[in-house]
Amino acid sequence: MPSKTRNPVTARRGVSLNVILTAVVVVVAIAVIGIVLLANRSDNSGAGSNETLRPTGSHTLSQVAGDEVTVVEFLDFQCPACASFYTNITKGLEQDYAGRFTFVPRNFPLQSHPLAVPAARAAEAAGKQGKYAQMYHALYDGYASWALTEDGKSVSDDLPRATTRFEEFATAAGLDLDRFRADVASPEVQAIIDQGVADGTKLGVDSTPTFFINGEKFDPQGSTAGEVDRELRAAIDARLAG
Amino acid sequence: MSRALAWLYTVGGGFGLAAAIALTLEKIAKLGDPTYVPICSLNPVISCGSVMDSAQAGVFGFPNPLIGIAAFAVVVTTGVAGLAGFDPPRWYRIGLAVGTTFGVVFVHWLIASSLYDIHALCPYCLVVWIVMIPLFWYTALDTWPVLAPLRTVHSAVLALWYVVIVILVLIAFWDYWTSLFS
């Protein structure tokens, strides 16, 4: 066998070169990857990306000290899928993980839903009086009563009916109704909604609901609510454990 | 066959065989119960389930790990026989070289699928990726005289190969890795 005569020769001269080259490859790779990861970490903790995902003053439906697990949901109050997610997934999540994760809802009203912006205005106006969570729940719990047509078959465009409902929700939440009406119409509230759309677009959101878990977009594999619920909980559990 | 190569076949083939058996068992469990979540599905990125359910996981019409069970068993057997003193004839070595070449090409196609199409990593598959590269590389060095010059830098080539794969995995799942570190 030629290899048997060749091996000892090459082995004696080759070992050091091979070992040196191997060490160089490994050390350079570890150094480069380590530096890039570290540099990226300092980028991440900076205000830039966090501010896009979760601007100062964003509402929270649940909060944990240190925000170790943060779920950001870009939602449209009139989108049927969002309402279904609320009923089947996020409402339970909010209860089961209350105080263990930070849950930040962001506005991403879609053009195809004529009452999505008015509903978002109602929620943000309630937020001005510290009752965002109450309005958020009222909007989704009472979804069928304002977001859908009377027959429940399609998305409603009946603004007066919806406005009446929003004001009923506001009264039930104990809001100052005059102030609520003024806030609903204010450019300040519209600016918060526009900010949500701008930030969502920047982050690549193109449909609702879209979730980000610790800044990472959550792409569920499952198609049923049960499957997605399991995946979302698994993703949160993994980060709670880590 | 050198003792080092025989050990590589025994240990590398053993890990590959174990991973293929584990994947097959997970596949069977999933067939019996479609809601079964494999033990190795930890999160959306580390997920055997989404890899096993992909079209690429059964590209020849049956689950890929069945190939692994058959082929890695041959590798282990060759390794153990080598340790026992078996010196394979040239045709046998060429057979091994052809087999491991098929394996390494297939594994790289699966790596590309996993990174760019399925967007998930499966831990058992990673074991197969890791063992397949040295099995191919050292068999090729042992079999083809044309590769003789590279014997002097054999492990540097292997290290470089691993580094390239690691970098591709890092880039493909960049958001996931940085979310772990931040």
Image: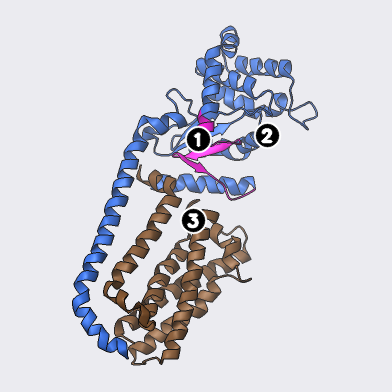
Q: Where is residue A68 drawn, in percent x and y?
A: 39, 38
Name the one closer to the observer, A44 or B40.
Answer: A44
Q: Colour of chain A?
A: blue
Residue B143 lies within the magenta run: no
Q: Colour of chain B?
A: brown
Q: Amino acid at mark 3?
A: Leu
Q: Amino acid at mark 1?
A: Leu
Name the one closer to the observer, A176 or A38.
Answer: A38
Q: Is residue B61 above or below residue A231?
A: below
Rounded to the nearest angstrom, the CA distance separating label 2 from label 1 is: 22 Å
Query: Are circles 3 and 2 on residues that touch, CB within 8 Å?
Result: no
The image quarter containing residue A79 is: top right
Callout 1: SS: loop
Q: Chain of mark 1?
A: A
Q: Chain of mark 2?
A: A
- Disc 1 marks which residue? A203
Callout 2: SS: helix
Q: Where is residue A184 drawn, in percent x and y?
A: 59, 14
Res A188 seen here:
yes
Q: Amino acid at mark 2?
A: Pro
Q: What's the image's color scheme?
A: by chain
Q: Chain of mark 3?
A: B
| In-image side of B117 versus B179 (left or right) | right
Number of other residues with Cα within 10 Å of mark 1, as a class: few under 14, some 14 to 19, many 20 or more: some
Callout 3: SS: helix
Q: Where is residue B54 drawn, in percent x and y?
A: 59, 60
Please report the residue visible at 74 percent of the width from the left and 22 percent of the height from the top: A157
Q: Which mark is residue B115?
A: 3
Q: Which mark is residue A80?
A: 2
| In-image side of B53 versus A145 (left or right) | left
Rounded to the nearest angstrom, the CA distance separating label 3 from label 2 is: 33 Å
